Image (cartoon, rainbow, N blue to C red):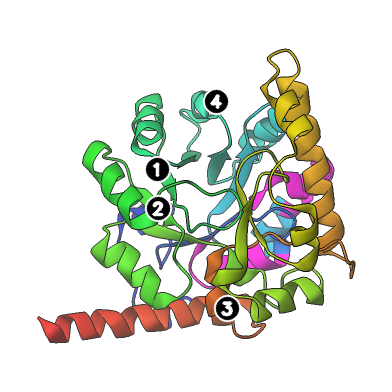
Amino acid sequence: MAGKFPKIETALTRMLKIDYPMIMAPMFLVSNDKMMIAALNAGIAGAMPALNYRTDKEFRSAINNIRTHANGPIGVNLIVNKSNIKYPEQLETCIEMKVDFIITSLGSPETVINACRNTGIKVFCDVIDEVQGKKVELLGADAIIAVGKEAGGHCGPHPIKDLVHKLREVCKIPIIAAGAVGNGQQMFDRIEFDRADGVSVGSPFIASVESPVSMEYKNACVDYGAKDIVLSTKISGSPCTVINTPYVQKIGTKQNWFENLLSKNKSLKKYIKMFTFFKGMKAVENAAFAATYKTVWVAGPSIEYVKEIRPVNDIIESYIDTYYEQLGNSYRKR
């Protein structure tokens, strides 16, 4: 699709040398080689969680495969807290393989920023408020992923519109909006009205042809909507959006009193968080790839706009088509 529409010039497109200011967001278990290749060939950037690959060999093979079949910026998401015991090796691999950018999540990005300095690898940091935004900018981050309350997966407490505006007041580096980007109209709003430099889009791609998850998971993204998304702390200990299936309703969305008590114990906190993360991710993995009554499906409110299962290229094209349609309407009203 790259070249079908005129390029959209923003700080993000200039930094990553892409046609359109969109990143296909890294999604645990979902993002894979096929999705990345399709995204890059469509003129946007793509990022994948390093944790989606069980071994370093598989991780390296995925990067090489993407480079063989696509020409565009490869991003990798690193969980940078102690729950991810593979983090040091994953960072080393990213640097050795010279990925184009790293997105840091759930922890301090300082080690990643320092390690990538002078390597040419850009570091984008997930933030949920302006305090975190200013902090990562001072550390040397290249861009900010503004994670709003409407984001899928791990989300923030503030509406994306407010968050981007607050970050604009204190930060000078590019800001990418994550949350409330379910279609081209919302992409237009985030960039043209909220003054974001780009958008990060995840949940609509779960229901793509290239996505590796089960048809049950994909169809759930089609059949459920924004009103069916709830926040759960049972997955990783941090607020995470999931589809409110009968199973989720049965197990609840909050840690029980015993889990909560252990999480606050200073000496046990680190280990409990690691165990909670591992247990929660295992539950999500089991539900993602097989038909099971234990359906814990991670998704955000933007599934409201998912009406069918489509190829990645078609999803991106619909965003850019609507974006330009709205841009034309905006100019006609002036």
Residue appearing at x 44%, y 52% in the figure: 148
Identify the image quadrant of the C terminus: bottom left
Residue appearing at x 48%, y 82% in the figure: 318
- The Cα atoms of the two marked residues, 2 and 4, are separated by 22 Å
* Horizontal arrangement in the rendering, residue 249 relative to residue 16 (left or right): right
Is the C-beta separation of discs 2 and 3 under 8 Å? no
* Horizontal arrangement in the rendering, residue 229 relative to residue 52 (left or right): left
Q: Secondary structure at mark 1?
A: strand
Is the C-beta separation of discs 3 and 4 under 8 Å? no
User: Camera-side residue: 218 or 257?
Assistant: 257
User: Camera-side residue: 290 or 80?
Assistant: 290
Q: Position of residue 106 (x, y in %)?
A: 58, 36
Q: Which residue is mark 4?
A: 115
**What's drawn in magenta, residue-wise?**
34-62
Q: What's under tag 4, amino acid-wise? A: Ala
Q: How packed is label 3: few (under 14 Cα within 10 Å), some, or many (20 or more)?
A: many
Is the C-beta separation of discs 2 and 1 under 8 Å? yes
Q: Position of residue 270 (x, y in %)?
A: 72, 22
- The Cα atoms of the two marked residues, 2 and 3, are separated by 21 Å
User: Camera-side residue: 260 or 196?
Assistant: 260
Q: What's under tag 1, amino acid-wise? A: Ala
28 w.r.t. 92: above or below? below
Q: Which residue is mark 1?
A: 143
Residue 41 visible in the snapshot? no
